[in-house]
Amino acid sequence: QVQLVESGGGVVQPGRSLRLSCVASGFIFNNFGMHWVRQAPGKGLEWVAFISSDGSNKDYGKSVKGRFTISRDNSKNTLYLQMSSLTVEDTAVYYCARSSYRQLMPGDWFDPWGQGSQVTVSS
Amino acid sequence: DIQMTQSPSSLSASVGERVTITCRASQSITTYLNWYQHRPGKAPRLLIHVAGSLRSGVPSRFSGSGAGTDFTLTIRGLQPEDFATYYCQQTYSLPYTFGQGTKVAIK
């Protein structure tokens, strides 16, 4: 079945870096754009980043732009989120989600989502 | 950024009841509005896309409607597995934004 599994979360000190991975299965990974979404404790969902199916186009939310990098390895069916200069405000559960399109398009929807990976930034 | 406002923020309902959740966008988003269900510790689940299209496999007791700035998610005949938090999301323009969520609890 179509599945996304995140990994790489953990506890990290402020200012440090962390890389999340999301392994896809059950569908042709290189046919779909991919998103990262996060949920801070007690908060709602926040869109983080998007990458097109071939990796050529990327977009970021304002709160992570310049610090986070989204990438993918289509040969490994894997999506990544490289997070740098982490702050306590980046503490959240991070979800990967499949786009409905190859490129960023209005009218997109996210389906499916992974179970999430917890990232805690704390000294 | 487009602001998405859901109401109510929480509600209590009994099994079998009809529940309505509304979502208002700060500007027109045509029908580029999705609804998700999120249970604690689980992956968020798409229910409705482009305002009124039911995702394959989602029970027909879920329905969505609306266009422009005002949207509604209706659950007819609430089931025990429906107690969760529901989010609307606009994908009209970046950054894609979500409502703050509506928690549906057992009365």
Image (cartoon, coloured by chain):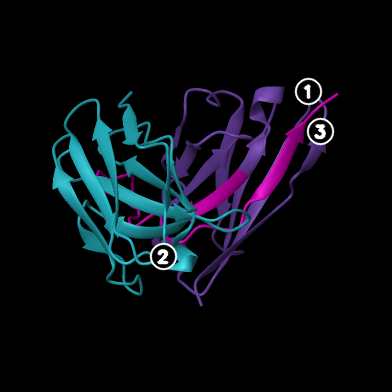
Chain colours: A purple, B cyan
Residue at 25%, 33% (x, y): give it: B24
Q: Position of residue A92 (x, y in %)?
A: 65, 37
Q: Nearer the viewer, mark 2 or mark 3?
A: 2
Residue at 45%, 70% (x, y): give it: A28
Q: What's the residue type where badge 2 is placed?
A: Val
The quadrant in which the C terminus of chain A is found is: top right
Query: Quick check: do tags 2 and 3 share a chain?
Result: no
Q: Is residue A33 above or below residue A39?
A: below
Q: Quadrant of residue B28?
A: top left
Residue at 78%, 27% (x, y): give it: A16
Magenta highlight on residue A102: yes
Q: Secondary structure at mark 1?
A: loop
Q: Is residue A102 above or below residue A83?
A: below
Specify whether B67 is left or right of B100: left
Chain letter for mark 1, please.
A
Q: Position of residue B59 (x, y in %)?
A: 33, 72
Residue underneath mark 3? A12
Magenta highlight on residue A117: yes
Q: Of the numbered discs in the image, which one, if any, rests on residue A14?
A: 1
Q: Mark yes or no: residue A85 visible.
A: no
Q: Secondary structure at mark 2?
A: loop
Q: Residue furthest bottom?
A: A1
Chain letter for mark 2, please.
B
Q: Position of residue B48 (x, y in %)?
A: 29, 58
Q: Nearer the viewer, mark 1 or mark 2?
A: 2
Specify whether B10 is left or right of A75: left
Residue underneath mark 2? B15
